[in-house]
Image (tube, rainbow, N blue to C red):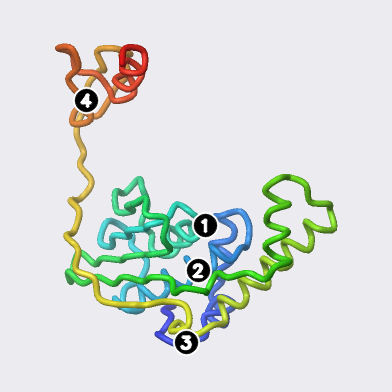
Amino acid sequence: MREEIGENSHEVAKKAGDYQRCVAFHGHDCPGLAIGYRAAKAGLAFLREDRAEDEGLVAIVETDACGSDAVQVLTGCTFGKGNFIYRDHGKNVYTLLDRKSGRGVRVALQSGVMDLNERHRQLIEKMRKDAATQEERREFWELHRLKSLDILKKPLEALFLIRTANPQLPPKVRMEPSRLCACCGEPTMGSKLVEFQGKDICRDCQEKTQKVNP
């Protein structure tokens, strides 16, 4: 089931159960997950594509926060398939690329969407410090649920800036035999080995050696 641009995503979530699948994968309901859900739905609708069964779609996320889990669930793009790419930019920006058509879409969160009221912010701080009472924890999760619901109900134009994207498509995942690291002896993808003091070693061993001998 595709979400058309401007369609009430809350109704789509209730009908298809897609949002609950995201919650089950992520572990809890929260505003960040709702953002990723709406972004993924919008991107798929823009490209007129469904969930990827192989590497046909590529997702590029610029955050490692909650929303990225929803993108994986809905698009079928995963680290294991090599079509889920993380860029550490700290932004709620999600780009989907279609290998077949060469088309792409960039979905960027607008300013102010994730603003929280003062009480919500206070409770977040208490939760971070593990100082919230049981009653405060219940209040926190209820405010989280209500904020998520608000995001699910909002029209797309109130949430995101959506535009065509034309970044270079990354290569498909490469399959190659492993070779043994000359230091730890563990099988390692050959192309990931690095030459260090005349030996081919894994990057983990290289980092450890450099820490000992900077």
The residue labelled by disc 4 is 193
Is 64 on the left or on the right of 172, as rendered?
Answer: right
Q: Residue at x 71, y 51 (%)?
A: 127
Q: Residue at x 73, y 66 (%)?
A: 119
The crowd level at tag 2 (other Cα within 10 Å; few <14, some 14-19, many 20+) is many
The residue labelled by disc 1 is 66
The crowd level at tag 3 (other Cα within 10 Å; few <14, some 14-19, many 20+) is some
The residue labelled by disc 2 is 35
Circle nearer the N terminus (3, 4): 3
Image quarter in which the C terminus is found: top left
The residue labelled by disc 3 is 7
Q: Residue at x 46, y 73 (%)?
A: 111
Image position, residue 124 (x, y; %): 68, 57
Circle nearer the N terminus (2, 4): 2
Mark 4 element type: loop
Image marks 1 and 2: residues in contact by CB distance under 8 Å: yes
Give the CA distance from mark 4 to mark 1.
32 Å
Mark 3 element type: loop
Circle nearer the N terminus (1, 2): 2
Image marks 2 and 4: residues in contact by CB distance under 8 Å: no
Of the two numbered discs 3 and 2 in the rendering, the one whose residue sits closer to the viewer: 2
Image position, residue 58 (x, y; %): 28, 60
Quarter-of-image position of residue 157: bottom left
What amino acid is at disc 4? Leu
